[in-house]
Amino acid sequence: MARFVRLVTRATEMEGSTRSVGLLRLCWGLILWARWADELLPFRRIEFGHWALSVCFFVGTTGMVVGLFSRLSSLIAGLTTMAMVFVVGHKMGVEPWTHHHTTFLAVVTLALAFTPCGRSFSVDRWMALRRAERQGNAWPLERGNVWAIRLVGLQLSAIYFWGAVDKTRWAYLGGDRLEQPLMYLYLGSDYPGAWFHWAAIGMAFTTVALEYCLAVGLWFQRVQKPLMVYGLLFHAGLYYFLPVTVFSIASMVAYLAYLCPQQVHDFVDRMVGAAPAREE
Amino acid sequence: MRMNDESPRPARGTAIRAVTLLLFGGWIAFSPAYRQVFDGRSTWFPRWVMFHGFGRDVCDVRFFEGAGTTLTPLDRFEVLGRERSWSTSKSLVRMGDPVAVDRVTRKICKALGAEADVRVYARCGSRGEWKVKRRPKSNACPSVRNPSPRPWEK
């Protein structure tokens, strides 16, 4: 028991650069807008409940994008989107809000509220610098306990794993459940031939194997980079060929959660031409 | 201006973070099992079954000319004099269910005339494997009743 407690406690301590969570927060706010902003404009439905959601959503997501009161903004946006998915979507029957990508967006938004996501790439950061300069202090470091970024990675890994579990059945691995959407979207009622069946089986096995590998492998630095390349190609392919909307870009952005925060920090330094600040 | 080098503050709220990790993290990682493995119904637990039902409104359809001993493939576009186009003949390009298959079959029968012998093989999409809905065992065209007013005179 003591070992378990120690393990859990250790998992909640991850002092590091806040640039990863800052980038995630900024991008996630934009992705939330891409998915929901139009639907939540006040004139779309003249109802009090809709307006309440609209105000909460835009206040929260605007704060996320510009980085103003970032954690609070993420909390507001997270709770709002969770309510949209689990209450409005599932309980009140707004089916398009119950899809996997909307659930993914809501969970990650809430997880960001547990990170110091305002310490980088934000108005919060700019204000902190101004405050330090006024007081004659050194600039605050872009560092904090970023443990909750692991929740973002955990969510994407859960999607890969449970998605692969769902596909580990004969209807999918036998090719049928891949042939159907491809015919529905591209080929119509004309079955192209036996080769199509074998191609579908190949794609099915590849997809399931890749999803299991991504679910686990992205946590290990040794295989992380090649797996990320495969994952990015996989999501780009899904986006191009199937109507997955923002799911692909959200998954790609969530890859930030697996990267070492210091590496992301150094990468940004290199990109802007600053010398990387090394840890002593 | 230089970055300061002060050491990080001692961790606070460890217990709250640990509880958050266990509850939120546990829900993220394990709750899909409730619906996907144990067939639970509560929608408070997510399930990750992407494209479970998408794209199943399509049938793989093959038409044949049944007169004679062998089945000869029939091109529905050629028989009906329509171009193979998603924009102008969508309902002919993609038949979504057995009703749509029967509708196209009737059109083909009509185009081929009263003596037509059209066989249809159709299997349609589902949440699982293809389901065979039509087999080419018999003529799919409506049988011609009393083709002659006095058949015994033949």
Image (cartoon, coloured by chain):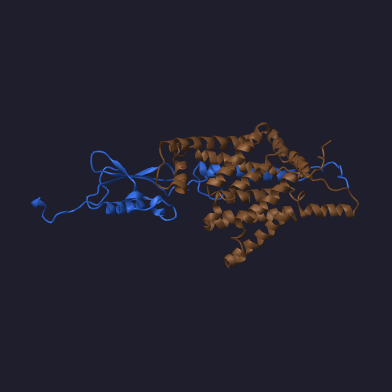
Q: Nearer the viewer, residue A270 or A210?
A: A270
Outermost residue, right side: A136
Looking at the image, residue A233 lies above or below residue A74: above
Chain A, chosen colour in render: brown
Q: Looking at the image, which residue is at 26% across and 38% down?
A: B70
Residue A220: image location, x then y, percent: 66, 33
Q: Nearer the viewer, residue B11 or A164?
A: A164
Tally of numbered discs: 0
Judged left or right of residue B94, residue A208 is: right
Outermost residue, top side: A222
Q: Quadrant of residue B134?
A: top left
Is residue A207 visible in the rendered structure shown here? yes
Q: Quadrant of residue B89?
A: bottom left
Outermost residue, bottom side: A46
Is residue B96 visible in the rendered structure shown here? no
Q: Looking at the image, which residue is at 52% across and 55% down?
A: A95
Q: Nearer the viewer, residue A276 or A188?
A: A188
Residue A144: image location, x then y, percent: 77, 44
Judged left or right of residue B54, residue B2 is: right
Judged left or right of residue B59, residue A93 is: right
Outermost residue, left side: B153
Chain B, chosen colour in render: blue
Q: Nearer the viewer, residue B51 or B94?
A: B94
Looking at the image, residue B7 lies above or below residue A29: above
Q: Looking at the image, which residue is at 11% across and 52% down?
A: B151
Judged left or right of residue B32, residue A134 is: right
Q: Looking at the image, which residue is at 47% across and 36% down?
A: A199
Residue A19: image location, x then y, percent: 75, 45
